[in-house]
Each structure stands twice: as structure tokens, then as C-alpha cells.
């Protein structure tokens, strides 16, 4: 059975990727195909899916700072959205066959957005740490916290008083830090991450809280360690494999009938209204139209959490059993529609920009763009390891250089180190239009996403930028495309590393040979003098 699940998921994911869709859409379709041919989910698949979600939320916790939840745009947008949707749900389900509680719980749970899809899309595009990525992530976590109380209402259970003990996890941080530092081997780091994620989930279940929240809190406990990026990278492939089981599980749920399909379509028709509501709220708190649009699009889905609440509501006899299949298909279709839209969110905004920017508030925006670069002659966009290395190289030669990055935490750390950096999202077309580039000699683009690098080059050329443009490529097909768009030079980091290593080795060998020749020459001269 396991071979059938994995093989079908792979083939469907391969087809989806060839159609420029995320593989997770293929996993969903694989689940429905297996459902149609009579394959059923069992406890093994459910258990694998649960592990996948716990690993996902654990890795999210690794990058989370609790202070991010206290930002004005997070509290105001997240809270207002939930309150508005709750009020509307109460009106819609007020007379729902006398089952007001069940209808209200389902209605509120549909206000939640898919944590899995949003995080996966943001991680794949390298935007999880950007300003809007952090806002989206914080709102999703706020929704998860509210979800705990909603589940308690749905199943009429209260968390154990011992649940407050989970708040003591941060006090175990020194021990967790020591364990991670002591785990020098890669396989040990991977095992430690899995152990902590599962331990957090188990502790949460024991005190009557969702295992997902426990895994998240365990990740928050480790956040801030110097090796956290390495641990997150080690967990990436394992997490992706287990998450395939989650999407298969959705598809293997019962398929609704014709009447229920109509209700599914009605639910899907409400999704654009949710997106519009998020967009309006983001604008009201002072974000620019672009940030509000891409953030809203990432949140315009139904959450996999609705699958959990529908199951609990049905088991409590608050709604008919058919609602499980209705919610399951609605969530699956919302993910299938939202995935490709989020993939091209920046392109969509470029098309809609003239209409959307008119709704921006005339205030000092929270995500304001820089309008000055001082006397900088070179710009380094993307202050990761490669970007910082380029910045240092310019700085050591007393060349005036300025770094740009979309990650507020990265900027804060670099400013503390005395580096000249400013906020700037390279995929934002307005950034390049506002920056005074007349005196800039060259721009180095080191962002991980190919779409970000290629769109930046295209925008710079459209603005008739005459300076040099240097960038990276990680695949052979990217190099020709980047040159075609107008890049001055393109390097492959791994190929260049090999070349430099060989050159250094040859130089060392040459110097060693010269030293040996000198020693031989000196020995010969000494021998002649003795004679």
C-alpha cells in the first residue's frame, strides 16, 4: 500500500510540476484518483500526515520571534478579520436546522487560511523572511492560537491546567542549545530536530492541546541558535516527504454528491471576498498596495484546520456527516486554485497595479521604500552569505557600497554591525523606479529565487540602467536567460568555487616547486663552495 501511495503521489506531482503547478496540487489529485479506484486511507497514512504537519510547524517555530505577533498590522488585521467573519458566520448559520453551534464553528474555521500552503509557497519563493512573509506567518500563528479555543468549544473539552506548563519551554532553551551545539554530525542534527518536534507534539496532546501547537512551541524554544539555518535545511527534505501524506489524505476523504458539490462551489465563491477583506484591512493599517495584495493572496485559502473542526463537529452530532466531505473538497480545491495564483502573485500585481495603487492611503507606509542611497556607487541586493561577501570585498577596497534586503531581522543585525544597508524588496517594481540610479556603476543581485533575479534585470533594463548587472545562476538553463535579459555577467557559485579551489591548489603547488628548486640551488652552491 505504501508503494501505491508514494508512486501515485510522485507521478501526479511530476505532471503538476510540468504544468507549472506546485507538486502539492498533484498530491491532492493523486488522493482523489486513489479514492475513485477504491483505495482508502488508514492509520499509517494519517500518522505520517501528522508527523509532516508537526515537522512543518517545528521549522516555522525555528524562524519565529514571539515579538512579531505583537506588531500593529498583525494584531489589527488578524483580529478584525476573524471578528468580521465570525459575525457574518453567526448571521448565516443562525437558523441552521437548529444546529447553530456546529454551523458557527464551521463558519469561523473557514476564516482561517492554510498554514501549510502559505508557508510552502513562501519558502519555495524564498520570501518567508521578507516583511510581508513575516506578517503572513504571524497572522497564521495568531489564527492557530484562536483555533485552540475553537476546538475546545467544538468538542466541549477544556485543555488541562497543565497546558500552562508549555509556556515554560523557553526556560529549557540553554539545554536545547547545548544539545544542538553538541550534535556536530549532520545525521545527529536531523535526529535532534525530529525528536524535539515529536516531543513537543506529544507533550501538547498530553495536556489537551493540538500537537501542532506543541511542535511549534518547541521550534520557538530553539529559535535564535547560530546553527538554526543548518538545522532547518536538514529537515527540509524529510518534512516535504511527510507532507505528501497530508495532501494524499485530503484526497482520500469521501467524495461529496451532486448537491454537496453545489455547496462546495458556494464556499469557493466566498474566497474572493475573504481576499478582498484582507486587502482592505492591510491598506487601512498603512501598508502599500503591493504588500497588501501579495499578503492577501497568500491568505486567500481555506485552512486544513477546517478539516479537523468538521470532524470534531460531526462527531459531536452538531452537523450532518456529509459536511466532512464538503469541507474536505472545498479545502482541497481552494489549495489547488491558490497555489498557482501565489506562484505568480508578483506578476498578477504588475497587471493590476494601476487600479490597486489608487486605494493606498496617503500616509507614511509601514513598508515604505527608500528614496535615497546616499553616495553609494555599487548596490548589493540580497544580504545573505554571497551578498555579504561581495559587500565586504567592496568595503575593503574603500568603494562606496550599499546593501539592500527584504528581511527586517537581517537588516537589524547588519546595522548593528555597522554596515550600510536599507530595506528593499527586489521584486517590487516601484523600488527600482524610486531609487536614484544615475550615479550607480553596478548592481549585484544575489537573491535565491530565479524569478526575483530575472524580473529585477528586466525592470532595470526597462528603466534604461546603463551600469553593470551581476547575478548568480544555480542551473544551466538560467544562465542563457539571464544574459538574454541583459545581465552583464553571470556566475555559477558551485562552478566558480571549484575553479577557485583548483587555482589555489595549482598556485600552492607552483610555489612549493619554486621553494624546492631554490633549496636545490642553494644546496648545489654550498656543495661547490665546500669543494
Image (cartoon, grey):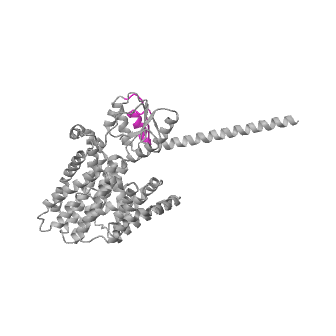
Horizontal side of residue 266 vs 128, given as left or right: left
The answer to whether residue 382 of the structure is visible from this angle is yes
Give the magenta range: 465-488
Residue 166 position, x and y percent, is 37, 66
**Observer-nearest residue: 2 or 22?**
22
Q: Quadrant of the C terminus?
A: top right
Residue 387 position, x and y percent, is 45, 41
Against 161, residue 83 (above or below) is above
Against 201, residue 66 (above or below) is above
**Observer-nearest residue: 35 or 109?**
109
**Observer-nearest residue: 435 or 512?**
435
Instruction: Please say whether residue 479 is one of the residues in the magenta stretch.
Output: yes
Instruction: Please say whether residue 498 is one of the residues in the magenta stretch.
Output: no
**Observer-nearest residue: 314 or 89?**
89
Residue 48 position, x and y percent, is 37, 65
* Residue visible at 36% across and 37% down in the picture: 456
**Total number of numbered discs in the rendering:** 0
Against 441, residue 356 (above or below) is below
Quadrant housing residue 301 = bottom left
Residue 56 position, x and y percent, is 37, 59
Q: Quadrant of the N terminus?
A: bottom left
The answer to whether residue 300 of the structure is visible from this angle is no
Amino acid at each position: 500500500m505504501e508503494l501505491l501511495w508514494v508512486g501515485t503521489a510522485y507521478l501526479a506531482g511530476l505532471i503538476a510540476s510540468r504544468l507549472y503547478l506546485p507538486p502539492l496540487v498533484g498530491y491532492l489529485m493523486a488522493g482523489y484518483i486513489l479514492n475513485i479506484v477504491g483505495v482508502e486511507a488508514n492509520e499509517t497514512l494519517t500518522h505520517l500526515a501528522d508527523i509532516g504537519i508537526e515537522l512543518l510547524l517545528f521549522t516555522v517555530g525555528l524562524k519565529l520571534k514571539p515579538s512579531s505577533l505583537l506588531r500593529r498590522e498583525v494584531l489589527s488585521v488578524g483580529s478584525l478579520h476573524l471578528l468580521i467573519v465570525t459575525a457574518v458566520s453567526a448571521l448565516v448559520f443562525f437558523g441552521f436546522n437548529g444546529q447553530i453551534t456546529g454551523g458557527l464553528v464551521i463558519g469561523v474555521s473557514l476564516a482561517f487560511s492554510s498554514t501549510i500552503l502559505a508557508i510552502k509557497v513562501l519558502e519555495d519563493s524564498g520570501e518567508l523572511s521578507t516583511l510581508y512573509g513575516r506578517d503572513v506567518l504571524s497572522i497564521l500563528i495568531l489564527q492557530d492560537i484562536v483555533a485552540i479555543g475553537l476546538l475546545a468549544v467544538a468538542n466541549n473539552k477544556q485543555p488541562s491546567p497543565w497546558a500552562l506548563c508549555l509556556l515554560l519551554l523557553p526556560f529549557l532553551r540553554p539545554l536545547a542549545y547545548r544539545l544542538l551545539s553538541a550534535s556536530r554530525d549532520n545525521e545527529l542534527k536531523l535526529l535532534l530536530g525530529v525528536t524535539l518536534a515529536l516531543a513537543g507534539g506529544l507533550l501538547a496532546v498530553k495536556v489537551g492541546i493540538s500537537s501542532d501547537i506543541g511542535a511549534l512551541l518547541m521550534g520557538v524554544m530553539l529559535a535564535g541558535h547560530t546553527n538554526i539555518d543548518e538545522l532547518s535545511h536538514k529537515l527540509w527534505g524529510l518534512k516535504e516527504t511527510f507532507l505528501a501524506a497530508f495532501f494524499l489524505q485530503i484526497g482520500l476523504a469521501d467524495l461529496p454528491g451532486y448537491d454537496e458539490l453545489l455547496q462546495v462551489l458556494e464556499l469557493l465563491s466566498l474566497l474572493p471576498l475573504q481576499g478582498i477583506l484582507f486587502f482592505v484591512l492591510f491598506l487601512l493599517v498603512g501598508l502599500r498596495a503591493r504588500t497588501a495584495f501579495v499578503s492577501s493572496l497568500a491568505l486567500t485559502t481555506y485552512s486544513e484546520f477546517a478539516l479537523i473542526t468538521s470532524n470534531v463537529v460531526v462527531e459531536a452530532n452538531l452537523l450532518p456527516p456529509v459536511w466532512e466531505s464538503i469541507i474536505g473538497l472545498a479545502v482541497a480545491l481552494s489549495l489547488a486554485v491558490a497555489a498557482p495564483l501565489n506562484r505568480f502573485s508578483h506578476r498578477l500585481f504588475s497587471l493590476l497595479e494601476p487600479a490597486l495603487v489608487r486605494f493606498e492611503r496617503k500616509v507614511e507606509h509601514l513598508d515604505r521604500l527608500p528614496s535615497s542611497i546616499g553616495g553609494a556607487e555599487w548596490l548589493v541586493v540580497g544580504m545573505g552569505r554571497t551578498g555579504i561577501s561581495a559587500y565586504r570585498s567592496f568595503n575593503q577596497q574603500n568603494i562606496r557600497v550599499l546593501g539592500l534586503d527584504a528581511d527586517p531581522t537581517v537588516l537589524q543585525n547588519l546595522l548593528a554591525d555597522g554596515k550600510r544597508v536599507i530595506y528593499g524588496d527586489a521584486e517590487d517594481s516601484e523600488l527600482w523606479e524610486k531609487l536614484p540610479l544615475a550615479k550607480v556603476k553596478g548592481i549585484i543581485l544575489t537573491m535565491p529565487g530565479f524569478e526575483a533575479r530575472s524580473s529585477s534585470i528586466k525592470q532595470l533594463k526597462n528603466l534604461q540602467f546603463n551600469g553593470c548587472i551581476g547575478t548568480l545562476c544555480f542551473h544551466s538553463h538560467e544562465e542563457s536567460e539571464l544574459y538574454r535579459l541583459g545581465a552583464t555577467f553571470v556566475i555559477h557559485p558551485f562552478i566558480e568555487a571549484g575553479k577557485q579551489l583548483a587555482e589555489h591548489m595549482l598556485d600552492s603547488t607552483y610555489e612549493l616547486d619554486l621553494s624546492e628548486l631554490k633549496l636545490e640551488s642553494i644546496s648545489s652552491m654550498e656543495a661547490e663552495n665546500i669543494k
